[in-house]
């Protein structure tokens, strides 16, 4: 088989790395890829949202399966376009992608189908949004409706701050169209976790649990980012909680989508707050999480391609993934200035030495090759994953490898996974 992976981040490198291990696969292409994906397949210089040329490439190159990494092409209808040409592609269609592309749609959907989430209002008028802010407690969350690359949710510490965010989004328009409509919601207290499945309509295959670290700085301080590190599995989701997530979140969501006439075929990601009352959805993503995909996929032992093909053939009832009992922990190495204004073009040192280490896998994101050097080319540069028989061991392996890598302005969190230790009793 020939497989095309769309995207250029750490998640896409992890998908391509996993796909390349499948005995079914002869060639892997990544569009546009990065300096890391070059090592597991062939990079194709077509941007992830250049749908017309991706279709052309897949048709002419006789690609048997396309896997979409990021949300943007999904929201723009890449799946619809491929299907029109009879090309096999894994991901939800444009309507399914609304679950991530519009927070207003997602919240109204959850309300309609009884999926637990924070109490909220949706607004197109700033004065009404402000009135609603005043009915909530001191801590209020304001979210831009549209896609904003992880920068559209504002967790406000006071009513004043929330009122200002409403103005920034709706009057000043700091996020453009994405912020013209907003969701205002109550602040939820609890532990955050990520739960992902591979869905085919109302059937699904669960992926291993994980926990992301969204804030830039240690101790969950600083601005929100796309994610600074993640580990899998997470003890925050015990067996009973997982059962609740499946029954209260995943199943009603897939059922609701089907009732809306959407055949959801793709990864589905629930970003959850585990509150005293149970799991509540903070957001849906219609793709794998990044960086969660990196530790998750290093643990998956089954053939991913085989399962994706089963899904596309409508044949997954009863299928379960084989997953390694090992722990995996991924640390994101980011550029100076990330997430606001990352510096790029810095030479990365130490990669070759680290690639030889056992139980360590380095996934590239913002990297590119320049002659015989690899240089930084984005905000999040690498995810360094360590594997171990205990979380502590996985953490040590990851950070020992991180110590060997260097580029100017490199920043990372040293506390990835620490939140888990209190659940593990040590
Ligand atoms: P979102 O883009 O909706 O996932 O929000 C980004 C981040 O903001 C989440 O990962 C949480 O850390 C935080 N967040 C979002 N909504 C809430 C909420 N209702 N209560 C507390 N924290 C939230
Ligand atoms: N790591 C969170 C996300 O991919 O949205």
Image: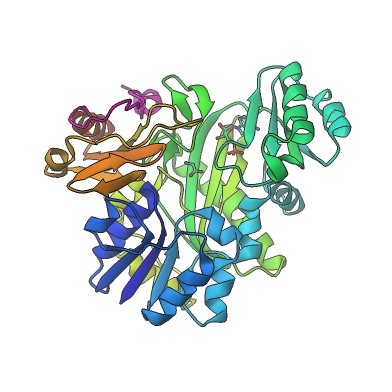
Determine the residue positioned at 36% across, 60% down.
321
Query: How many numbered marks appear?
Result: 0
Please determine whether, in this image, residue 206 is positioned above or below residue 344.
Answer: below
Please determine whether, in this image, residue 411 is positioned above or below residue 306.
Answer: above
Which image quadrant for residue 228?
top left
Q: Position of residue 219 (x, y in %)?
A: 44, 19
Q: Position of residue 250 (x, y in %)?
A: 57, 54
Q: Can residue 1 be seen here?
A: yes
Front residue of this view, candidates 19 and 417:
19
> Is residue 173 a member of the stretch shown in magenta?
no
> Is residue 420 a member of the stretch shown in magenta?
yes
Front residue of this view, candidates 69 and 418:
69
| SS assignment for the magenta stretch, majority | loop
Q: Quadrant of the C terminus?
A: top left
Determine the residue positioned at 38% across, 62% down.
45
Determine the residue positioned at 36% across, 28% down.
416
Segment tinted magenta in the rendering:
403-426
Front residue of this view, candidates 157 and 318:
157
Q: Position of residue 73 (x, y in %)?
A: 54, 60
Which image quadrant for residue 167?
top right
Please determine whether, in this image, residue 126 is positioned above or below residue 88.
Answer: above
Q: Can residue 231 be seen here?
A: no
Q: Position of residue 241 (x, y in %)?
A: 51, 41
Front residue of this view, candidates 157 and 378:
378
Q: Is residue 363 left or right of residue 200?
A: left
């Amino acid at each position: 088989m020939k497989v095309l992976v769309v995207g250029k981040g750490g998640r896409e490198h992890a998908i391509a790395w996993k796909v390349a291990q499948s005995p079914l696969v002869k060639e892997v292409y990544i569009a546009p890829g990065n300096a890391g994906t070059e090592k597991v397949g062939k990079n194709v210089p077509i941007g992830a949202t250049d749908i017309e040329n991706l279709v052309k490439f897949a048709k002419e190159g006789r690609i048997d399966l396309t896997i979409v990494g990021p949300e943007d092409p999904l929201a723009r209808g890449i799946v619809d376009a491929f299907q029109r040409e009879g090309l096999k592609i894994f991901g939800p269609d444009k309507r399914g992608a609304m679950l991530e592309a519009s927070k207003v749609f997602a919240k109204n959907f959850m309300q309609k189908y009884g999926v637990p989430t924070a109490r909220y209002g949706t607004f197109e008028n700033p004065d009404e949004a402000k009135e609603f802010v005043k009915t909530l407690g001191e801590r209020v969350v304001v979210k831009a409706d549209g896609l904003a690359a992880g920068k559209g949710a504002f967790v406000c510490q006071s009513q004043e701050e929330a009122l200002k965010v409403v103005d920034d989004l709706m009057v000043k328009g700091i996020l453009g169209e994405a912020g013209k409509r907003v969701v205002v919601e109550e602040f939820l207290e609890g532990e955050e976790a990520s739960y992902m499945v591979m869905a085919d309509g109302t059937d699904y295959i669960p992926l291993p649990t994980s926990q992301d670290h969204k804030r830039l700085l240690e101790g969950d301080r600083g601005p929100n980012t796309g994610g600074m590190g993640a580990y899998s599995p997470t003890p925050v989701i015990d067996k009973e909680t997982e059962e609740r997530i499946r029954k209260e979140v995943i199943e009603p969501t897939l059922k609701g989508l089907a009732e809306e006439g959407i055949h959801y075929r793709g990864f589905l990601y629930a970003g959850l707050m585990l509150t005293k009352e149970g799991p509540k959805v903070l957001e849906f993503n219609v793709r794998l999480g990044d960086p969660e995909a990196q530790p998750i996929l290093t643990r998956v032992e089954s053939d991913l391609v085989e399962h994706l093909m089963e899904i596309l053939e409508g044949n997954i009832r009863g299928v379960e993934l084989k997953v390694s009992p090992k722990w995996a922990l991924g640390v994101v190495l980011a550029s100076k200035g990330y997430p606001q204004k990352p510096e790029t073009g810095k030479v990365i040192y130490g990669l070759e030495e680290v690639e030889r280490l056992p139980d360590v896998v380095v996934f590239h994101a913002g990297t590119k090759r320049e002659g015989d050097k690899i240089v930084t080319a984005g905000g999040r540069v690498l995810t360094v994953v360590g594997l171990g028989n205990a979380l502590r061991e996985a953490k040590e392996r990851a950070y020992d490898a991180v110590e060997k890598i260097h580029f100017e302005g490199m920043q990372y969190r040293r506390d990835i996974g620490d939140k888990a230790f209190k659940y593990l009793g040590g």
